[in-house]
Every structure is written in C-alpha cells, then in structure tokens.
Amino acid sequence: MAIVNSIFTWYMKKRVHQIELFMKYPHDVQEEWFHKLISSAEDTEWGEKYDYRSIETPKQFKERVPIQNYDTLKPYIERMLKGEQNILWPSEIKWFAKSSGTTSDRSKFIPVSEESLQDCHFKGGKDLLSIFCNNRPENQIMTGKGLVLGGSHQINQLNEDSFYGDLSAVLIKNLPMWAEYYRTPNISIALMDNYEEKIERMAEATIKENVTSIAGVPTWTIVLAKKVLEMTGKDNLIEVWPNLELYTHGAVNFKPYREQFKELIPCDQMYYLETYNASEGFFGIQDEVNSDEMLLMLDYGIYYEFLPLEHVEEEHPNTLGLDQVELNKNYAIIISTNGGLWRYMIGDTIQFTSLSPYRIKITGRTKHFINAFGEEVIIDNAEQAICKACNETGAVFKDYTACPIYFKGEEVGGHEWIIEFDQQPNDFERFVDVLDETLRAVNSDYDAKRFKDMALRRPKVHNAPNNTFYNWLKAKGKLGGQHKVPRLANDRKYVEEILPLLSVTA
C-alpha cells in the first residue's frame, strides 16, 4: 500500500504544473474555453437559435444570448429528460443532477454530460487530491479508504435511458473502478434514500475500515460522526480511525463548524480542504494551507461572467469578464458550461480576494439576504457575526436562520433569528449583543438603520431546542444529501414554519 501511495502522490503532483499554467495565463485559458464551447454547440438546437456559428467574441455572445435561470432553460431540460438529444449540448445527455437548493421546494434537474463529468467534476476531484498531495507530500491517504457522505440515487422514470440523483450520487455511480475500490461504504449503502437508516448503516459499515479521508457537508458529517462515536463508545474520531488525515468539505461556510471538528478530530495534523462543487459545475478549490480562499478553477470547460450584485434585478444587466472584476466586491456568477448551461445564473455570490491568481470566497446567495429596510445583510455578514458571538460566549452553533420583523403600528422593524446550539453560550444576552454589534461593525447599512433604534431594533433571537432544524428538514422530506437550512430570507416563510417547533422539547 505504501508503494501505491507514493506512486499516486507522484502522479497527482504532476497536475500541479497545469494548474500553475492557468494561474499564470487566466485570460488566455478562459478565452480558449469560450471559443471551444461556442464551436462545440454550433449545431445544437440552442446554437442554431442564437446562431453560434457567427459568434466570434464574448461581446457578441452577451448581446445575443440573454442571461438564463432554471425557469428559462426548463422547457429545454424537460425535453432532454424525455430523451431528446442535441438540444443544449451535442453529446448524449443521460444523467441529471437533481438539486432542490434551499430557495425553492421545486426540484431542478441539471444536465450532466460526459464532458462535464470527466473534464469538470472528476477533474476537480483529482485536482483537490493533487493540491493536497503537493501541500502534504508525506501523506498516506491511499493506504486507506475515503468515506464519502453522498446523496441518494433514483432512476428517472420519464425515460429508461435517463437517470437522476443528487450530484454526489451521480458522481459515485460513474466513478472509475479504481476510485470505487478506495471509497467506503459500498454503493448500496451510499445511495440509500432513507437518511436516518443510511446514517446508521454508514456508521456500522465504516467503523472497522481504515478511513484516511472524509468528504461531505459539515452538518451531515457531524451527524454521522456522532453516530460513529455512539456506536463505538470512543471519545473522538481519531480513536476510531487513527490514520484519518483529510476532511474535504463544501456547500456551507466551514468557519462556524471548525470548533466542533476540533473536538471530533483532536489532531493538529488534520488537513481541511474546502471545495466549491455545485450541481452546475466544479468551480473552486482551497489551494493554500493557511487560507480559506479558493482558487477559481479556469480549465474545467466553464466560461465565467460576473454580475455586480446591485445589477442583478436589472432586465439586461452588463456582466464583467474575468479581466474586469475588482477585489472585495459582491458578484453573482454567470456560467456557460460543457454540460449545456448558457449564461446561467447559478444563484451564488462571491468576492474576489486575489486577482493574481484569481481566488474567491463565497459570500451568499442572490436570493438569500435580508433587505427589508435597506440594510442589505448577506450571509457573509451573518456568519462573521455569529462566529464572533460564539467565540466571545463559549458557544458552539449548530444551525440558524433569520428573517425580517416588519414594521407594525408604531413599532420599528428588526431581525428575528432562530439559532440551535451544540454548546450553549455562557451568557445568552451577551451573545445577542455581540451578534448585533458585529453586524453593525461589518455592515454600515445595518449600522445606520440601528442608530438609536430608528429603523431596526436589537435582534430577536430564539434559542432553539436540540434537533429543531433536523426535525424541520425531516418534515419537509429534505434530510441529508445537499439539503441545507436557508440562512437568511427576505420574507418570514421559513421562520414561521420553524417557530411552532420551538415549543417541542428535544
């Protein structure tokens, strides 16, 4: 196993030179992919509709093709689900990543072509291992197995040749044989639909394995970890898996969960690596050891545009190319991909933290914010505030959501939070004060509205009983996989659904 691990590490590090190449020539690489994508789709129904054959520049592309969202592409995707081909992309599409996100109860079916599987998602998976091996050449990751906490897989009944599932399930189902050998648990457990039974079976199946790495969303990884410790009677995961050395995570901000993972994995050598991998594509990898920024991956068959957040609601907004972006400004991401998504707004917002090379951090969602009073609070603001409040009161947070409290009569507005803790704050009122003070410090619009309680009063915070959010997700049929608690909303829908659960004892 040690020889295999050495060969694997050597092989993976070879890719680092190609990564360095797009870091050095980012605009050339993006321009090359723009032309590849346009020429590939010339003869598709979409390509003929917008006369891709005559498009020569990104400027022409932007003028001709409107910005898309799922609703605008849905009629095309529904035909593809029924088996029609050459609609948005020329190669055969038989896999669809089912994504419900957090903003809607409706399912989205994102087409996954063979090119997007191989040149985007799988390439991203290999690259995160390349970066890890380069940063930690003495690793022993291939001497054991990778525990992958994925979603569920189902067969699409609309067409016997079409399949759908969570992205993680689509990837697991298409893994090459060598990768499947290094993964645990087996596929019958990994793709179970019933998440409560699945967690139990996963714990049983992996306890005796030599697990060297874990990949999964932090919230559900914690649920699995606690089940493993309950079954084994151990105090932490290192006692169960002494060779554990890598945790790969994504989908939610890891910062609020860091303290919990230090308790679960009390090892200074543990390597944490964040990825930005969505159903629509693989976009970023944390490439530096002591930084939580992610390198924007530019050679995965994706052409990027960036829309300043203040222009998102405009009818024909002007997007920026990679060479036009600025540091520390919020942008919505627009992508055109080798899976047939064209000028598609994925709904995430990012900021550039470096322009040479291009590194990013995720700041929120285009529809996940609170701006009922002009305060423009985004997820990044909220998570800075909740982390500071936890640090100052010894708390460990588990999940939260927040929304506006609207003006009523003579009463000013406010924000209402529901927060569930793994470890309670030593002073709850102090927690609320620090939360409020930090929001004021990081967001000048919020601070202005809070001045003398003129437009916003002190936040109303509910200390939720244990398992409140788990029970809410379960009631909605959204346990596990890629399902996440919506952090912020500009209406009261989620909070009103959860409030009745607060009276239920844990």
Image (cartoon, rainbow, N blue to C red):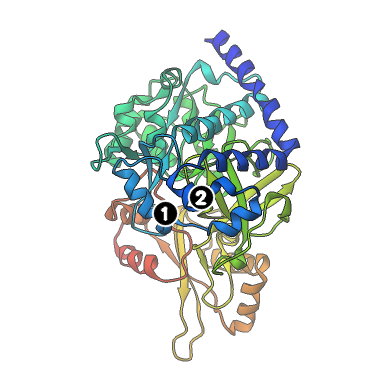
- State the image coordinates of residue 382 (x, y, percent, origin top left): 56, 61
Q: Is residue 130 among the parts visible in the rendering?
A: yes
SS at mark 2 in the image: loop
Rendered view: 142 above or below 101: above
Task: Choose top left, top right, bottom left or bottom right for residue 458.
Answer: bottom right
Query: Which numbered disc covers residue 363?
Result: none
Rendered view: 435 above or below 478: below
> As rendered, which of 268 and 329 lies closer to the eye?
329
User: Closer to the N terminus: mark 2 or mark 1?
Assistant: 1
Q: Residues within 10 Å of mark 1 (few under 14, many from 20)?
A: some
- State the image coordinates of residue 484 (x, y, percent, origin top left): 42, 51
Quick check: 243 left or right of 291? Answer: left
Q: Residues within 10 Å of mark 2 (few under 14, many from 20)?
A: many
Contact, mark 2 vs mark 1 (Cβ under 8 Å): yes
Rendered view: 136 above or below 86: above
Q: Write the residue at 42% across / 58% down.
A: 72
Task: Give the amino acid type for the residue marked by disc 1 in the picture.
Answer: Leu
Q: Residue furthest top?
A: 3
Quick check: 277 left or right of 6? Answer: left
Q: Is residue 236 among the parts visible in the rendering?
A: no
- State the image coordinates of residue 457 (x, y, percent, origin top left): 54, 79
Q: Write the residue at 72% across / 31% down.
A: 21
Residue placed under numbered mark 1 in the picture: 73
Residue placed under numbered mark 2 in the picture: 342
Task: Choose top left, top right, bottom left or bottom right for residue 152.
Answer: top left
SS at mark 1 in the image: helix
